[in-house]
Image (cartoon, grey):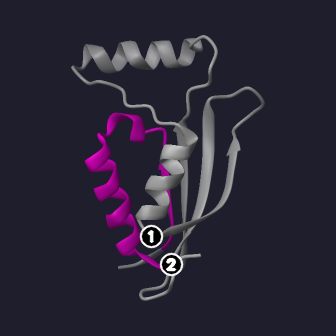
Amino acid sequence: GEADTALVIDIIHMLGDRALEETLSQIRDRLVPGGRLILRATVPGGGPRPWMRVLEEFRLRRLGLTPRYRSREALEATIRAAGFQIETVEPSAPASEETWFVAERFAPGEAQP
């Protein structure tokens, strides 16, 4: 079936670029036209690593995984390429690396703005 909203929260740093592209494409295909993607991801800042990211990196490395953090610009480009129009991008809190991306699915055959 189709859904009107998809939530992707704190997971994409575990996916390589190709896996992320495929995941977003599959989500897009399962959303109704105009459906929303709500995604929260860690977008590293320019300062020292916060303890939450240090802890997550340690946890992933113990599992044999490499974290793949992306810039805001890279995530926006990947989301758009998957067929979404970005509506909002904002941090979870001031000075937070966790960033919310809200995007709308394009209807089939609709031109992207």
The secondary structure type at the circle numbered 2 is loop
- Please tell me which residue lies in front, 90 or 38: 90
Label number found at residue 65? none
Distance from Cα at disc 2 to Cα at disc 1:
6 Å
* Residue at x-position 51% and y-position 19%: 53
- Label located before the other in sequence (2 or 1): 1
Instruction: Give x and y (percent) for residue 113.
Output: 59, 75
Instruction: Give x and y (percent) for residue 102.
Output: 61, 58
- Residue 43's quadrant in the figure? top right
- Residue 29's quadrant in the figure? bottom left
State if disc 1 and disc 2 touch (CB < 8 Å).
yes
Instruction: Give x and y (percent) for residue 36.
Output: 56, 68
Q: Which residue is mark 2?
A: 106
Q: Which residue is mark 1?
A: 83
The secondary structure type at the circle numbered 1 is loop
**Looking at the image, residue 76 lies above or below residue 34:** above
Left or right for 61, reference 40: left
Q: Is residue 6 magenta?
A: yes
- Please tell me which residue lies in front, 31 or 24: 24
Tag 1: amino acid: Gly
* Residue at x-position 40% and y-position 78%: 2
Tag 2: amino acid: Phe
- Residue 49's quadrant in the figure? top right
Report the magenta residues as a range. 4-32
* Label 1 Cα neighbours within 10 Å, binned few <14 / some 14-19 / many ≥20: many
Instruction: Give x and y (percent) for residue 94.
Output: 78, 30
Please identify the quadrant where the N terminus is shown: bottom left
**Looking at the image, residue 61 lies above or below residue 32:** above
* Residue at x-position 27% and y-position 48%: 19
* Label 2 Cα neighbours within 10 Å, binned few <14 / some 14-19 / many ≥20: many
In this view, which residue lies farthest toward the right?
94
**Looking at the image, residue 34 lies above or below residue 23:** below
